[in-house]
């Protein structure tokens, strides 16, 4: 995902001279291509992420299209006030990129985990939240974000995530993408758990449960048209995310659902629990600890589906 982002930023900067990149003392080698071509449009802001956010707001006020980038918790929770007051209050076209969201940096401990960022940012007026499912969606999401005149939070994984899309799908902020078609269960996946959702759907198919998979890449604004159709069509709708069960995609869908007439479907949510992950290990190990594996998702859906 990170490499796709870096390559696409270079391509977009060639097309639009207003594109500037601000980094929180990270990604120096990642953005070598950008720095070489556009040295006067790259700003290493050091470990001063709050200042970086305010700088980006000022640049946007002057007509530029700034993109800020660093590890997710340092580009969200550390500078939440600046995002709220400097960016969202003025409804500025700043793109905030969080790299290594969720449990991508599992081995570095709680300071580098990011399972609350969607919850924090989605309550801010004017903010759009986009969580691409693979490298293909990263490219398309960045282009869509630059066409948007409001703040956009772009939530990425770390690296080496499997590519799900064989070709570019239609991409629009606020519109989900159907990846696999089915008739019994609908999995709404956001962010870098899309490959996990696809694998879970395959296991469910082996159990005789026809499963649809949707890359629900935009948590705000919600694709309410897709949600309405899903809850009228499927016996179960499940949200899948590497984020807390509180306040993320599952929480957003539950809030929306509470205001709708009683439908056909049951909602099931998969995410991280309301607790910190204290045990050390890599991302795969952390996902096993919190139940974000194809096997666990499949087993829980089968259990609830047969109740």
Image (cartoon, rainbow, N blue to C red):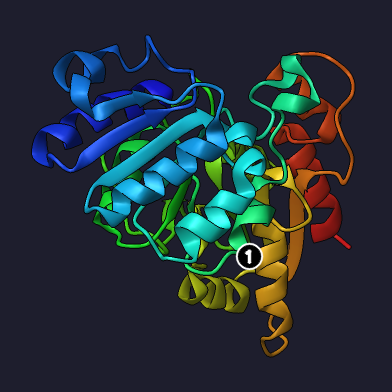
264 and 225: which one is in front? 225
Tell me if residue 282 can be seen: yes
Outermost residue, top direction? 29
Q: Residues within 10 Å of mark 1 (few under 14, many from 20)?
A: few
Report the quarter where the N terminus lies.
top left
How many numbered marks are there? 1
Determine whether the residue tagged by mark 1 lies in a helix, strand or loop: loop
Question: Vertically, is 106 above or below 98?
Answer: above
Q: In this picture, is 42 found above or below 65?
A: above
Q: Residue at x 54, y 52 (%)?
A: 83
Front position in the image: 287 or 182: 287
Q: Quadrant of the C terminus?
A: bottom right
Residue furthest bottom in the image: 261
Q: Position of 151 compared to 276: left or right?
A: left
Left or right of 77 in this view: 295? right
Left or right position of 47 against 254:
left
Q: Residue at x 34, y 26 (%)?
A: 43
**Residue 208 location, x and y as percent?**
67, 49
Relative vertical location of residue 166 with respect to residue 32 in this rendering, above or below? below
Taking the spot 78% from the left edge, 56% from the top edge, the residue there is 246
Q: Picture coordinates of residue 52 (x, y %)?
A: 46, 36
Q: Give the image location of residue 9, x and y in percent.
A: 26, 31
Q: Residue at x 59, y 37 (%)?
A: 193
Residue 165: in sight, yes or no? no
Residue 222 placed where, x, y %?
Answer: 52, 67
**Mark 1 lies on residue:** 123
């Amino acid at each position: 995902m990170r490499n796709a982002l870096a390559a696409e930023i270079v391509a977009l900067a060639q097309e639009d001279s207003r594109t500037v990149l601000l980094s929180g003392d990270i990604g120096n080698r990642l953005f070598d291509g950008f720095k070489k071509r556009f040295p006067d449009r790259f700003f290493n802001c050091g470990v001063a992420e709050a200042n970086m956010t305010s700088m980006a707001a000022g640049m946007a006020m002057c007509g530029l299209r700034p993109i800020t980038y660093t590890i997710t918790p340092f580009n969200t929770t550390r500078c939440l006030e600046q995002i709220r007051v400097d960016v969202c209050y003025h409804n500025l076209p700043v793109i905030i990129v969080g790299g290594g969201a969720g449990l991508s940096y599992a081995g570095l401990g709680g300071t580098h985990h990011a399972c609350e960022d969607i919850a924090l940012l989605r309550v801010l007026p004017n903010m759009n939240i986009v969580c691409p499912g693979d490298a293909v969606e990263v490219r398309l999401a960045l282009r869509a974000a630059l066409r948007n005149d409001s703040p956009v939070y772009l939530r990425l994984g770390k690296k080496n995530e499997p590519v799900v899309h064989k070709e570019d799908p239609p991409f629009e902020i606020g519109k989900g993408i159907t990846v696999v078609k089915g008739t019994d269960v609908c999995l709404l996946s956001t962010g870098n758990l899309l490959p996990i959702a696809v694998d879970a759907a395959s296991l469910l198919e082996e159990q005789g449960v026809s499963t649809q998979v949707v890359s629900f890449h935009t948590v705000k604004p919600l694709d309410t048209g897709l949600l309405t159709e899903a809850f009228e069509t499927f016996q179960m709708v499940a949200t899948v995310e590497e984020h807390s069960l509180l306040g993320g995609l599952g929480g957003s869908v539950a809030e929306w659902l509470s205001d709708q007439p009683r439908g056909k479907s049951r909602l099931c949510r998969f995410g991280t629990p309301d607790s910190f992950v204290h045990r050390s290990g890599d991302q795969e190990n952390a996902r096993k600890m919190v139940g974000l594996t194809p096997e666990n998702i499949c087993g829980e859906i089968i259990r609830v589906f047969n109740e």
